[in-house]
Image (cartoon, grey):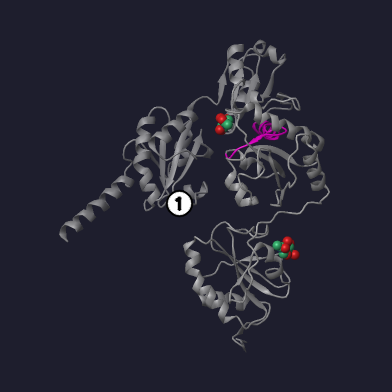
Amino acid sequence: MLFSNIAFLCLGVLHSVWFAEGSGDVLELGDADFERRVPEHELLLVEFFAPWCGHCKRLAPEYEAAATRLKGTVPLAKVDCTANSETCRKFGVNGYPTLKIFRNGEEASMYDGPRTADGIVSYMKKQAGPSSVALHTEAELDAFVNSFNYSIVGFFSGSDVLGLAEFLTASSALRDSFRFAHVTDLRIGFKYGVDTECILLFRPPHMRNVFEESVLKFAGSLSTSTLRTFLRDNIFGLCPHLTTENKDSLSSKDLLTAYYDVDYVRNPKGTNYWRNRVMKVATQFLSRGLSFAVADREEFHEELEEEFGLQLSDGGETPIITIKTRAGHKYIMQEEFTRDGKSLVNFLEDYFANQLKRYIKSEPVPETNEGPVKVVVADTFDEIVNDSEKDVLVEFYAPWCGHCKNLEPVYTELGEKLSGDSHIVIAKMDATANDIPPNYDVQGFPTIYFAPARQKDQPRRYEGGREVKDFISYLKKEATNPLVFGNLRDDL
Ligand SMILES: *[C@@H]1O[C@H](CO)[C@@H](O)[C@H](O)[C@H]1NC(C)=O
Ligand SMILES: *[C@@H]1O[C@H](CO)[C@@H](O)[C@H](O)[C@H]1NC(C)=O
């Protein structure tokens, strides 16, 4: 008893010492000095933490070790948000730990690297290098642009020209997404037709093709934002290689994707064989608002299965073609991809003529559905949840989710209590096995929505408590008609 108390005490003291004193090489910043001290550093990593947070405690020794190893290269700092809420609020910290990279006092990006000492050290070392590599010879230029990645090179006539300074500022802001280099002697760019100061975007050699330029010139007046726009608009070209890494930057487009064995390392020839066939067709549909990509079927097999119900074996050797629009509408090309491209042309013509049937992932419609909680699947969503005469409370759940399991008896009891009310439907849908309609936003489970009668275009998220009484009091307030319990009218 006595011993365990002592042990407990020591632990408590240790923890508070660990966090309270700027132990070791991590700078401690707070409301009083953050704004003054952060701009002192060209590059700075800041951890926003709370002393009670488990992930923060686990990170602490790694962070400390990384700070020691990075001493003299990149400083690491931390802010205790429980004591410095003003700073944390200013930088939008809403979870712990949050790690952000600052450059010359400005928030530059989120730190999304590993959370081990080794990982932090190598990530931040890379960040500390120049944002744009200085190239001195034609050979260096060739080596830089013949890389596996896109390259952006600024060609300047000297090292003291204004354009170079602008370019370096822009590259420093955009370095997380793009590779930059510059030369200060225009002759080095002669081979690429450079005769005046300019910025060129080079596609990597393996992505070059006969359908588009391999080298693009930035036109317009240079600033970080004009360069960013130019790169965003042009980096992907006619038919980029979609990867798990870049897919988020393509998700805001209406995108046709050809899935097959895309492998630029082991099978560049086969990879470009099909890509060229897709591109050839793509050129006929330019400027109609659809983007194109190729992707490795294996890399995306989980998404193919989850989003399109497709198996790895579907399609055999030839590409599987899908379209996903930014509104979340999905289409699958049913015909096999033919080498002459005809089937793809047909598919696209049907798509633009609105002739395609949307693919909607749905569980089978249940044979009976008489329980107190109605089972909804994607195919019956319109019929049950969109029933314009009824108020519908619909729960989106995942079979593995603990909170959903806890809610189940409550939800069933609610359904039973209201089973005599013909104006109210208590319903649930397995959100992992059915597509969720676009006007419902489901990020976590369970997510509950109330779709009032005659206002099905405006479902409202239920944010109340998870007891029967909470649901009842919500429905009493929101329901279109007075609630009916059992068979008795409730006019309270
Ligand atoms: C290309 O370079 C950018 C910027 O350095 C980097 O973020 C990205 O991961 C690289 N992509 C590939 C495929 O190497
Ligand atoms: C439900 O109705 C709304 C409003 O009319 C409509 O926008 C939505 O597409 C419908 N949902 C389904 C799944 O049919």
Q: Is residue 480 above or below residue 329?
A: below
Q: In screen coordinates, is 270 left or right of 281?
A: left
Q: Amino acid at mark 1?
A: Ser
> Whole-percent x and y of residue 391?
67, 74
Ligand 1 closer than 8 Å to label 1 CB: no
Q: Residue at x 72, y 75 (%)?
A: 389
Q: In screen coordinates, is 272 left or right of 1?
A: right
Q: Quadrant of the C terminus?
A: bottom right
The crowding category of the residue bearing disc 1, from other C-alpha atoms within 10 Å (few below 14, some 14 to 19, many at least 20), is some
Quick one: 130 or 458, which is closer to the camera?
A: 458
> Whole-percent x and y of residue 374?
61, 72
Q: Residue at x 41, y 36 (%)?
A: 76
Quick one: 26 or 423, which is closer to the camera?
A: 423
> Whole-percent x and y of residue 104?
51, 33
Q: Is residue 128 above or below residue 492?
A: above
Residue 301 within the segment the image draws in magenta: no
Q: Residue at x 63, y 82 (%)?
A: 483
- In the picture as drawn, the residue positioned furthest to the bottom comes out as 488
Q: In screen coordinates, is 10 left or right of 170?
A: left
Asked whether residue 331 appears in the rendered view, the answer is yes
Q: Which range is magenta? A: 224-244
Secondary structure beneath dot 1 equals helix
> Whole-percent x and y of residue 334?
73, 47
Ligand 1 appears in which quadrant?
top right
Q: Is residue 167 above or below residue 44?
A: above
Quick one: 237 or 104, which is closer to the camera?
A: 237
Task: Report which quarter residue 363 is drawn in.
Answer: bottom right
Q: Which residue is mark 1?
A: 85
